[in-house]
Each structure stands twice: as structure tokens, then as C-alpha cells.
Amino acid sequence: MRTSSKRLGLAALMLAGAASIMPLAAGAQEAEAPAAAAPATADAPPPAAQGAFQVSEELEAMRYRHLWIAYGVIWLFVFGFVWRNWKLERATDRELAALEARIGDLEGAGVKSDG
């Protein structure tokens, strides 16, 4: 019973601490907002934004490159599976044709099966 009351007290203390810090964080964001809202020139974004944009383009290009590689690997597996099954089906057809020919030869020679 004592541990649950300690936990409640600790939770209340953490909540009070978070509530006291939040106005400070909001004030800091408001102080930064006017500086970030006014760019140095009307034509070009601030240098920090340009760097972030270049990094974003690089990440975007890398994401699509990995996407194409993933699709390529998947299609290779699909084509490999279809090609393998086609080869196995051809081998089965050859074996079936050979068995049919052998049965035809045995029936033509007059050999009777015991079945």
C-alpha cells in the first residue's frame, strides 16, 4: 500500500514539474518565431532552410533508390520462380511422353500387365 502512495506522489510531482516547465518552453518558441518568420531576403530562404532542403532531397533520392532496388529484387524472384516452374513442367512433360511411349511399346509387344 505504501508503494502505490509513493507512486501517486511521484506522479503528481512529475506532473507539477511538467506544468511549470511548459510555459517556459512556450515563451522560448514565441521568442524564436519572429526571427524565423522573417527571412533575410524576400527571394531566397535562409541558409538553414536551404541546407535542410538539400538534405531532404538527398533523403528522398535515397528512398526512391532503395525502393527501385527492392522492386527489382522482388521481380527477379518472381521471374526466377516462373522460369524454374516452366523448366520443371517441360521436364515432366518429357518424362510423361517417354513413359507413354514405353507403355505403347510394351502393349505393342504383347506384354500384359498383372493388374
Image (cartoon, rainbow, N blue to C red):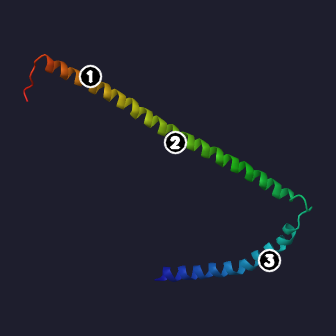
- Relative to 2, is 30 on the left or the right? right
Mark 1: which amino acid?
Ala
- Residue 113, image x, y percentages: 9, 25
Viewer-closest of 18 and 40: 40
- Within 10 Å of disc 3 (Cα), the crowding (few <14, some 14-19, many 20+) is few
| Cα distance between the residues tagged 3 and 2 | 51 Å
Q: Place residue 13 in its image quadrant.
A: bottom right
Residue 2 vertical position relative to residue 48 in the rendered view, above or below: below
Residue 71 vertical position relative to residue 18 in the rendered view, above or below: above
Mark 2: which amino acid?
Ile
Q: Place residue 101 in its image quadrant.
A: top left
- Relative to 13, is 55 on the left or the right? right
Residue 99 vertical position relative to residue 23 in the rendered view, above or below: above
| Cα distance between the residues tagged 1 and 3 | 87 Å
Q: Nearer the viewer, mark 1 or mark 2?
A: 1
- Residue 108, image x, y percentages: 15, 18
Please report whichever mark, 1 or 2, sits nearer to the chain's N-terminal start: 2
Q: Residue at x 83, y 57 (%)?
A: 48
Q: Check if mark 3's residue and mark 2's residue have beta carbons within 8 Å.
A: no
Residue where numbered disc 3 is placed: 27
Numbered disc 1: secondary structure:
helix
Q: State the mark number for residue 51.
A: none
Q: Place residue 9 in its image quadrant.
A: bottom right
Please report whichever mark, 1 or 3, sits nearer to the chain's N-terminal start: 3
Q: State the mark number for residue 98.
A: 1
- Residue 60, image x, y percentages: 69, 50
- In which quadrant of the rendered image does the C terminus lie? top left
Viewer-closest of 34 and 74: 74
- Within 10 Å of disc 2 (Cα), the crowding (few <14, some 14-19, many 20+) is few
